[in-house]
Image (spheres, coloured by chain):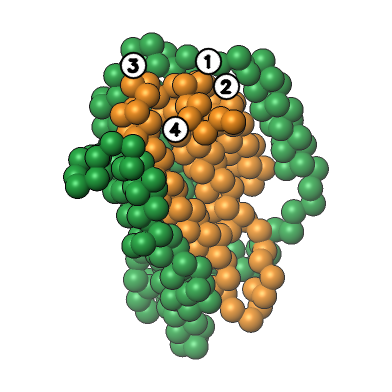
Amino acid sequence: MSFEAFLIVSAILFCIGLYGSLARSNFLAVLMSIELMFNAVNVTLVAMAKYLAPAGLQDDLSVVLTGQVFAVFIITVAAAEIALGLGIVFAMYRTNESVDLADATQLRN
Amino acid sequence: MLFQDIVFWLLSLVAIGAALGVVLVRDLFRAALLLVVVFVAVAGLFVMLSAEFLAVVQVLIYAGAISVLIIFAVMLTRDVQQGNLPNRLQFPAVLFASLLLAAVTMAAVDTQWEFLPESQQGRAELVQTGAVATLTGETLAESGVTAPEEQAELQEAGLADLLIGDFVLPFEAVSVLLLAALIGALVLVRPRTGPDTGSSSGPSTGSSPGDG
């Protein structure tokens, strides 16, 4: 279970999420795929925090936690994003009677 | 080490398989449930990376809160059964995603990573697990850290220290972002009844986040 293995697993997760967010037509499916991508990035950050030598390691040992701090921020931003995204889903469903992204044409032209 | 390898590959297979299920299964409700499986598997990966605090946060926020929100949204919107249809971009999306995967994999394998020196690995792991478990003098002595000043340094280092210390500005910014997002979500889902009905309610709901 080397560092590269973690990177490759998270790259696979990220690309699955990327495919899902590009190729699905349902808004909720796209939101779920975006959550997959957030998780993949978090795995990468935490793996880097564990395996790699950060700058300034000699002065202060707590820099080995920087990757985890970034992951905490990403989790918070993901929570904000999903709250707002679901609000948009509900608003769209109320006006369109559908959550298909092809039907979201109000802002076109 | 062998046991850890087995657990790692098991968790990875579960995560990747469930993630494929999320994007391929037609029934959106099942996709949401598979998403929970991905979240729990990723929490397991966090434990393997000695990030126990993040694993707990992952289970609480992702598997607990976000998945419940998504399942609610799936059940409140009607077209669940035939919901997860692919759009016309199917083939370009597969091509783009696999090209990106190949590029990232090559970069990950080819890069000369600057690994943490052997001598620091034990102490780094102590700091990272110390984010949840309070490091007492005895546990540090068991791990071979006996010098008092070194013990103090390890006990001081922690996730909360960094969050409120070096990263206090992003921390506050993120909390403001969270507040703004929640107010925005409330405004978006507010029922359109009230003193102003009809066509004028659209613009007024759009501008209220700025007022708050």
Q: Is residue A39 above or below residue A18?
A: below
Looking at the picture, tell me which residue is in the foreground, B133 or A67.
A67
The residue at the far left in this view is B194
At a point 38% along the width and 11% down the height, the residue shown is B82
At label 1, counting other C-alpha atoms closer than 10 Å, the crowd grade (few under 14, some 14-19, many 20 or more) is some
Labels 1 and 3 within one chain:
yes
Q: CA distance from mark 3 to mark 4?
A: 16 Å
| Pointer 1 with pointer 2, Cβ within 8 A | yes
Which tag, 1 or 3, sits closer to the chain's start? 3
* C-alpha gap between disc 3 and disc 2: 18 Å
Residue B124 x/y as whole percent: 55, 66
Residue B92 location (% of width, % of height)? 69, 20
What residue is drawn where x is 37% and y is 24%? A96
Look at the numbered disc 1 and give the secondary structure of its residue.
loop
Kindly indicate the quadrant of the structure image that contains residue B113: bottom right
- Tell me the CA gap for discs 2 and 4: 13 Å
The chain to which mark 3 is attached is B
Q: Are marks 3 and 2 on the same chain?
A: no
Name the residue rendered at 33%, 12% in the picture.
Answer: B81
Give the residue number, with chain letter if any, for mark 2.
A23
Residue carrying label 1: B86
Alpha carbons under labels 1 and 3: distance apart: 14 Å
Left or right of A74, for residue B139: left
Q: Is residue B87 visible?
A: yes
Q: Quadrant of residue A58?
A: bottom right
Disc 1 and disc 2 on one polypeptide chain: no
B180 up-or-down from B189: above or below: below
Q: Colour of chain A?
A: orange
Chain drawn green in the picture: B
Q: Which residue type carries mark 1?
A: Pro
